[in-house]
Image (cartoon, rainbow, N blue to C red):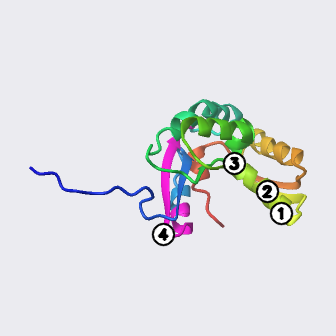
Amino acid sequence: MEPLHFTASQNLNQRATMGLIVLQEDETIELDFRRLLPDDIALHVSRVASGQQVTPQSLESMRENLAASASLFPAAAEFDCVGYACTSGTSVIGTNDVELRINAGCSTRHVSNPVSGIIAACAHLGITRIALLTPYIPDVSNKLRDVLDQAGIASPSVGSFNQADEAIVARIDEA
């Protein structure tokens, strides 16, 4: 059989390429991202092992798996950004360590996470106090409050569903 001539594209006709590291138990964020992103943004998703119970210890355990999860993205993809989609995990692991571990697993121009996003948005808008609603148990919710407080964002009003079961968290009704 005679081989046919071809050329290979670097960007697959996409304006940008994004990677998203999602918790093993998460069932919603991929759908949300695909609805929110324009069609010309490539989205690649990897999963990180996460416990069925959301505790400071289970969130901390993701630290060791972040680089491996990032390494599962397609090696040929040139990522503009890779996001870690876990607010509470970022508050436990730390924004800098999340970035270091993702960069250890893949090549990307930027690393993003929800905690850095909250802090940047509040700084941009001049917000220093927020009300916080979280699905998690107090030990997890309070860690996020502490991180925000260290960034100059007070959360004097907090509501929580006090839920530790990750499978239930994703299914809490909007109402």
Residue 6, quarter of picture: bottom left
- Residue visible at 43% across and 65% down in the picture: 13
Q: Which residues are magenta?
A: 32-50
Amino acid type of the residue tagged 3 in the rendering: Thr
Q: Residue 62 — which label?
A: none
The residue singled out by tag 4 in the image is 39
Mark 1 or mark 3, which is nearer the start of the sequence? 3
Residue at the spot of label 3: 87
Nearer-N-terminus badge (1/4)? 4
Residue 28 visible in the shown view: no
The residues tagged by marks 3 and 1 sit, at their Cα atoms, a distance apart of: 19 Å
Of labels 3 and 2, the one closer to you: 2
List x then y, in percent, for residue 172.
Answer: 61, 57
Assess whether mark 4 and mark 1 are in contact (beta carbons under 8 angstroms): no
Q: Amino acid at mark 1?
A: His
Q: Which quarter shows the C terminus?
A: bottom right
Give the residue type at disc 4. Answer: Asp
